Structures are given as structure tokens and as C-alpha cells.
Image: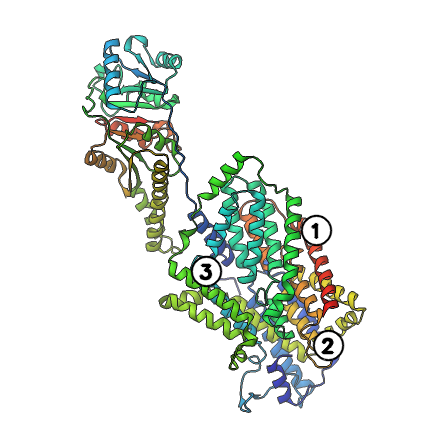
Amino acid sequence: MSDPPPQHEPPDRRLGAIDEFESMFKRAERSPFHYHELPIGTVAVVTDGSPEEAAALADQVRDHFTRFDDRTTWQTVPGDRYQNVNELLDVLRDVGPDLVVTSRCLFEKSLVPQHTLGVYVDVLTQVADFPVLLLPGTAPQPRPLKAEPCREVMVVTDHLAGDDQLVNAAARFCPPGGTLVLCHVEDDVAFRRHVEAIGRVPQINTDQARELIAEQLLAVASHYVDACAAELKRSDRDYTVEKVVEFGHRIVRYRTLADERKVDLLVTDTKDEDQLAMQGLAYALSVEITDVPQLLL
Amino acid sequence: MNVPSMLLLAEAGGHAHVPGWVTGFYAVVLAAMVVCLALEEKLHVKKSLLVGTFAGFCLITETVIGYFTDRAHPMLPFGPVTLPNGHEMNLPIFIPAIDWSVITIILGASLFVEVTSRSGIFTWMAIRLTKKSGGDPWRLLLFYGVLTVVFSAVLNNVTAMIIIGSLTTVSLGKLDRRDLLLGFLVTEGLLTNVGGLLTLISSVPNIIVGKTAGISFAQFFFVASPYVVVATAVTLLQARMTFGVKGLTTDEERTEAAELVAGFDESDYVPSDRFFWTSVALLVGFILCLAGQSALPFQLNELGMGFVALFFAGTALWFYKKEVDTFYKAVDWDLLGFFAALFVVIYVMEQAEVLALIGKGIGLMLGLPAMLAQGSLLVSAAAASSVTDNIPLAAVLAKILAVDPLVVGETGSNPGSPFWWCVVFGANLGGNITPIGSASTVVAMTIIHRQKLPLTFLGFVKVAVPFALVQIALAILYVWIYALLV
């Protein structure tokens, strides 16, 4: 008698039980949040205009983002101090900033730039190890910062849990009494595609998989936001921490949330695992949402 | 000999004469079954089917051989079974051959544990202790070691290994101490078989030997617990030295480790506080009822431990009244089928006088000076259970000892005999010599390989043998002391 054709056997009973308990314990793991005040000793304001324009811009930034104190040193890097990207990098190396404030599309007046960061910012975000604060609009067509001081800071990411640096940077710009929105949007298009694949695997119950995986994807981020809120409260930070953890089209949701909440600053990560030469979410956000200042880490 | 067997024999009006070649033939069949069980993983056949096939073969051949050798006194005593109230009942011969009290204890206890574990009580305890350890490796080993022993005693060795082994991989991963993972998993695997000695229901050999010997739950616990405490402490110290598990030395290390384990949320898998605390109460009640079963009033003690187990399982199932079928599916029917078939095989072996033949060999051993006899029996049981299933071993030895005058004396019953403990200790601890010696060490190896840790069969033996030798030596010493005291 020949062997029957191979069946889709359930996994070995013991292996299944081991996996089940490992999953339970992994699920019980929580990513802790450690608060620390991000040091910003020197801020470099990079423009493609004159020294006077750069100094005026520095004043605007200082007025809008009120968390900078007297200990912060402001350095301006006007357009006459560099001719190309390498020279700008050399200048910044000399300045040694903790934060660079600049605009999209430096020296691209003649190109009518659209949906791009411009070569200078593009390179800065990839090679520099300091955060870059992008001002609204572009260098050729700047948009003014709001007259009122920054009150609401929103962290936008698709993998919030464990990213202490991102939350600490956002907290650094949030004034006392302000609102810190921690936002995690899971890509519903990718999720639907995965569920469709699961739907073609007879061994997996599709409805159950959809429900449980969706629940877990959001639970991890949700627990992390709770940990952030608890830790910030313990650290006597006078913020209101709000949680937005949901499924959706990321760029569309971030755009909508930014508009609805009238946020004053978006904070995102350009150097995480998903950002290959900044071609991930951060790039898309920074070229699509140009009317809100953005802090790129 | 169990009651059904006696009834059947009484019904048959005595035992048939069994030719020597028949006994020899079935001795070979028994040996073949033991070899097949040892090679179960290689044969890719489940135990129930394997032993069920042997049981079927034995029933058919013994019937046919009996027909041709002595038709007037067939080896298998067919006929109606007389119940205690005098009524007669026609049952297939393989039904009364099974020791249903053992089957019901295993069925009830596994169902009960399956339901109560849904309350999150065991994972809650495991995570609480992880946090209490502060992430210190030595304290973690101590806590996990004790927890392994307790879980092995309350649940069963396999479930205990799965829970603690899984948590160990997650927590050491979080602490970035995967270098200690192998040592932890091996130690936990070895401790499951020590914990399996703690109570009468902690392992199947305990149930079989305990039931045959007439040892009560409480009596079993009081005799076994001092050994378990000492053996656990010694094993943990040995593990500390063997695997270089040291405590954290600086405050900075301690703070960092404590922060990492503090991130676990023990309440994550607790579906409801009400069910959680009810499960705690049921668990305590279950253990108390088992402990006091023989003293239950109004003849309730006559219902037996199997009923206690099924009663608590049924009570717990009310919490999931709409989905009880999922728990029925979770029962290890392969294991239950294996036991049932095994009892049939042993019954056939008894009729073919194979057990009497083995008993003669063991009788020679038991006839040695008492201390030497006890040591020899314990070591032999350990050696045999290191390479094959300890359940048939315990079942066969229990049957043989139950009729040996050196063990049960003239009254035919002596629950205090140290020889029972030789079988209990030997059958359980022998599982620590090789990775296939017990189901829980097989699980430990499965987790080790799943974590891509390098440990071969011989590698395990090399690491485990020093532990097993110490545990067995302690057991011999303990049985000698026990023999002096009783």
C-alpha cells in the first residue's frame, strides 16, 4: 500500500503548545519608555538667502518654538557660506549643531520645485546625525510660521513602540500645557494584502487571523503610548498625551490628522530600518505635507 | 492485581496451564513493544496506535493459541463479569482489563488543568516570579527551578516544561542573556522529573504504582516531599556551578535588568478576575480533595480519585459551557488510548505468565540484602526508563511487586514498603539520563532545537548524567533512610 498523499497536517501538538506559550509571554512584554531631555545646545539656521534673512528666520523660529531657552546658541548659515552640498556639510561640521533649521529646495529658485526636498536637505537627512527642522513651504516659496507659539506636536510613524528617541524629540518641542499626539497608523492596504494571502491558506482561519493580527498590531503601539504617558507624568512634564492608533492609508491619515488637529509640528524618523536612503514614510510625508513644520530625526 | 482481573479469573475458575514456549513468545512480543516505544520518534507512529496494534495482536494470538493448546481452560478467561452486587455483565474481555481508575484520574486532571490554565493563573504566577527576580540570572534560575517543580507537581511534566521553557526563552532574550538559555532549559528539563515525584498525580508512574500499592495522596506527598526539596536544591546548586549562572554584581546591572523584566504585564492573559480567582479556589479545592479523598465522609471516598478529578473538571467546564468541545479536543487522546492499550497488553502478558517470569528475575533481586535489593531495583528501574517509556515499566513492575511476598507480605498489602518507592524514584529519575528518557526532556530538547542551540543526543547525556547520578544517589540514600524509619 502506498503512502497517502501528504496532508496539511496540524503542527505537532507539543510544538504548537510551545509556540502558544511563547506567544503569550511575548504578548505580555511591554516596551518601556525612558524619558530624557534632548540636549539642544547649538541650533544652526541654514538658508540660501542673506545673513539678515537668516537672522530674521532664526528669530521667527525662536518665537514659535518656545522651548528653546537662553542657553541655546543660535548660528546662522546664510547662502554665501556654501556653494554645494559638501561645503555645507563642512560648515555644519565646524558649527557642530544639535539641530539644523532649514527649508526644502535650497538654491532651487529657477527649478520651480515640487514634491521634493531638494538636494541639500536630501543629503542632510541621509548623512547627518543631527535632527533637521524643516520649515513650512520651500526656500523659493516659504510659508510663514504660525503667529501663535507651537502648542501641539504630533509624532507620526508606523512603528512607534520602542522609539524613545522620537518621543523624546517631540517632547522637547512641546511647551508646558501643550499637547503631545503620539500617532501610529498601520498601513491598511498592506494589511488587506496579507489577509488576502491568509485567505488562501486553508490551515489558517481567515476571520480569526484578521481579527487577532489587527488587534496585536495596534496593541503594541497602544501599550507603548500608555507607557510614554505614564513616564512623562512621572517626570513632571506638563503635557497632555493623546493616542491615535489605528489602521488607514498613512499619508492620507496623517494629512487629515494634521489638518483636523491643526498641529504645529510633525515629528518623524528618517533613519529607522524602513528608511532606505530616506525613501520610506518620512520622505513621502515631508514632500506631501509642506505646510506644517517637520522635525526629521 | 486489579479488581477486574480478579473477577475475571474468579469467573474463569482458575488459571490455565501455560506452555513455556507461549510465555517465551509473549516475552519477545513485550520486548518488541518496548523497543518500538523507544523508537517511537523514529517510527513516526503515535503511541496509541503502536501499543493498540500490539494489544490487538496479543488478544487475537492468545485467543487462538489458547483454543489450540487447552480448549477447556483458555488463557483468556472469557465470560461474564460479576459485579459487587452479584449481577453479571457481559463485557468484551479488553474492557475489564483496563484500569479505569487510572484512566479517569488522567482524563479528569488533564481536562481540569486545561480549563483552569485558561484563567491565566499559571502564566500569571510565572511572570510575577520573573518580575520578583529583578532579572538577576541566579535568582531567575532559582525561581524558575522552584516553579518548574511546583508546576510539574500540580500540572504535569510536559505542560510545566512548555510553560517555564517558553517563558525562559522570552525573558532571557529580553535580558539579552541567551548565553544562559541552554543551561536554564536543561536544568528545567531535569527538574520536571524531580517535581513529578511530589504528588501521587504528578506523573503517570506515580498514579500506577500508588494505586497498585494503595498509597494515599497525602501519604505519597509526605514521603516524597522531603526528597523533592533536597533534590531540587542540590540540582540548582549543581546547575549554578555547571552552567556558570551568577548573580548580578553592580547596582547599575541590577537596575537595568529590573527595568527590563518590569516591562512584563502579568495581567495580560487574565481574561477575567472572577474566573481567575475561581480557578485559584478550584485548584486549591482539587488538591485538598485529592489529599483528603480517603477520608471523605458518607462513603464518598469509595468514588475514588478519578471521580474527584472528573468532578472538578466538570465544575471548571461550566465557565466555558458553550465551548466545552474545544476542551474535549484538547485532551491528549493519544495518551489515553496508549494507557488503555497498554493495560490490555499487560493483562495479556499476565495471562501468558510473562509477568510471573519477569517477577522471578526481580524476585532474585529482591532476595538480596535489603539495602542492596532496594538500590538495585531503583537503579534498574532508572536505567530501563532512561531508554524507554517509564509507564509500561511502572505498570509491569507494579503488577509484579503487588504479588511478591517480600513487598506486600503475607497480608497481600503493604503501602509502606520501600520497594514501591524504588520503582517510583527509578521510573521518574531515569528520565533524566537521556533526552528520550521522559516526555518533558523531549520537550526541553524541542525548545533547545527551536532556539537553534547546539545540543546533540550525546551532548545532553554528557551534561545530564552527572545531575541524574546525584539525584539517583540521593534517592537511594533516601529510600534507605525511609526503610529504617517505617
The residue under the point 38% across, 66% down is B319
The residue under label 2 is: B404
The residue under the point 66% across, 89% down is B71
Above or below residue B103? Residue B6 is below
Instruction: Name the secondary structure under disc 2.
Output: loop
Residues B325 and B104: in front is B104
Looking at the rendered structure, whether the residues under marks 1 and 3 are on a common chain is answered as yes
User: Tag 1, which chain?
Assistant: B
First in residue order: circle 1 vs circle 3: 3
Classed neighbour count for the residue bearing mark 1: other residues with Cα under 10 Å, few (<14), some (14–19), many (≥20): some
Looking at the rendered structure, whether the residues under marks 3 and 2 are on a common chain is answered as yes
Instruction: Name the secondary structure under disc 3.
Output: helix
The residue under label 3 is: B117
User: Tag 3, which chain?
Assistant: B
Tags 2 and 1 touching, CB below 8 Å: no
Q: CA distance from mark 1 to mark 3?
A: 34 Å
Residues A274 and A131: in front is A131
